Image: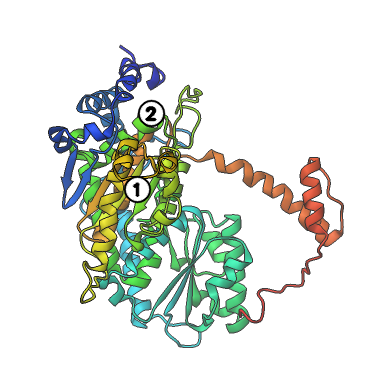
Amino acid sequence: MASPALISESEQWKDLKQHVSEIQTTHLRDLMNDVDRCQSMMVEYEGIFLDYSRQRVTKETMGKLFKLAEAAHLKEKIEKMYGGEKINSTENRSVLHVALRAAREKEIYSDGKNVVPEVWQVLDKIKDFSEKVRSGAWIGATGKPLKDVVSVGIGGSFLGPLFVHAALQTDAVAAEYAKGRQLRFLANVDPVDVARSIKDLDPETTLVVVVSKTFTTAETMLNARTLREWISSSLGAGAVAKHMVAVSTNLPLVKDFGIDPANAFAFWDWVGGRYSVCSAVGVLPLSLQYSFSVVEKFLEGARSIDNHFYSAPFESNIPVLVGLLSVWNVTFLGYPARAILPYSQALEKFAPHIQQLSMESNGKGVSIDGTPLPFEAGEIDFGEPGTNGQHSFYQLIHQGRVIPCDFIGAVRSQQPIYLKGEVVSNHDELMSNFFAQPDALAYGKNPDELLRDKVPDHLIPHKTFTGNRPSLSILLPSLSAYDVGQLLAIYEHRIAVQGFVWGINSFDQWGVELGKSLATQVRKQLHASRVDEKPVQGFNFSTTTLLSRFLEVRTPYDGTVLPKNVI
């Protein structure tokens, strides 16, 4: 029997829709009393402990979700991805970010060709180059070693590497390798970001990494030209070849820019930008900062989850479990958002990366064959490290809208501190909240409990917590480079699981194109108005009014690069 065009037409989907009414009669306060249920909702892999017992599910719900996964051909879709089939059908591309961290001897094919040797050719090149820069064998135009790196890129060329950088900064091993070095990122085309990225840097000791697959990304290339001017105005045009390298496949444009094509590091069409942190996009700047040996541990961590995702039964498969639970929360229970709450300051850039990874991947309104979806897919992702978030948006999470939460913690701190005389260490204080918040969300506090606490009657409605708010907890053994790689891969594959079940293409991003094309029209108008003093025309009344207001203040086009106080 042929599969239905939409997963929502399947009997398994309809069965889950009917099951929702049963779940609506339950409360987590009662579900959590079932020890057997709770034990069945705890999974461990390589020291990573997942507890999803505080989700609004029963063992029956999970059985129905596994049947839905079977109806959606989840296992076959995972195998197709790993097998290099062109599952990104709208762009006719394979989806092989798993190949970026595959073992050297592994065979992964795209278009009949094993891509792993090419991956390792680039990794070996990165290792060699980064070691030369770090050792001082590669020096700048004036003979000084290059100790500062600015990575220029946007979107996936920025958010993923920034997340890993922030996570490794305070890891003891990584920090030792990073002594005396700086890594900064320049993404926004806003000149303020340019100024901040090079503040207090010396062009003589700075290496710029330009990350653009086509070497045509408008924001990235304008920023790259700005930093090229910053270098050449100080050191001469000939210095560019020593102070700028590229992550790109467009070698002619790299050469035209002034970068030696020998110093261009490749990546491939089968790597989506938001999935590219394990390519040269992330590995090059991170290796320059922390050494290739540290970054290789990060790749090995991601690889371990790749193997787990591919081979583990769904009942014990962490990415599959959290992916199916997200489908349940978004599409069946109607919760459109998810809060990512890492109880580690080292993971402060994790939520912004997953925000792009998830929302750009699964923010779709049609199925993979173009049929409009009759259900909601994708979720709104946001987050902040605990306990900062508790003093920001937890009020809404506890007493406003229901927002499923991911609590992420680590057994060992990167920077353990214990003050003599304190009840607990600093890390234990942090983790006290990690353990308490999920229970507060699940159980809440009802009026009877408040009365027993002698809360005045007029305050009882304000202090009532309904509870029954779902969450899951992920407890990592530590936050080493290996652990960070594992965490990234769990979320990458979780997002793929959601898309595979919903029947959408999680690997294209046509939604970003329309705004870009309209910006091209605006850019032409701004040039015409600034240089030739032509009036604004061809736009609607609102945009015309805003543009005219913006153009009232004359901006000199005199070739000024940056304010003198920044240079």
**Inter-mark Cα distance, 2 to 1:** 31 Å
Is residue 541 found left or right of 38 in the rendered image?
right
Residue drawn at the location 59% of the way across and 42% of the way down: 513
Mark 1: few/some/many CA within 10 Å (<14, 14-19, 20+): many
Three-letter residue code for mark 2:
Leu
Q: Give the image location of residue 268, x and y in percent.
A: 41, 50
Q: Most extreme residue toward the top, as rendered? A: 1
What's the image's color scheme? rainbow
Q: Mark 2 or mark 1, which has the lower sequence index?
A: 1
Q: How many marks?
A: 2
User: In the structure shown, which secondary structural element does the residue marked by tag 1 occupy?
Assistant: helix
Q: Give the image location of residue 163, x and y in percent.
A: 39, 59
**Disc number at residue 451?**
none
Residue that badge 1 annotates: 97
Q: Give the image location of residue 334, x and y in percent.
A: 42, 29
Quadrant in the picture for the N terminus: top left
Which of the 4 image quadrants contains residue 71? top left
Quadrant in the picture for the C terminus: bottom right
Three-letter residue code for mark 1:
His
Which of the 4 image quadrants contains residue 556? bottom right
**Disc number at residue 333?**
2
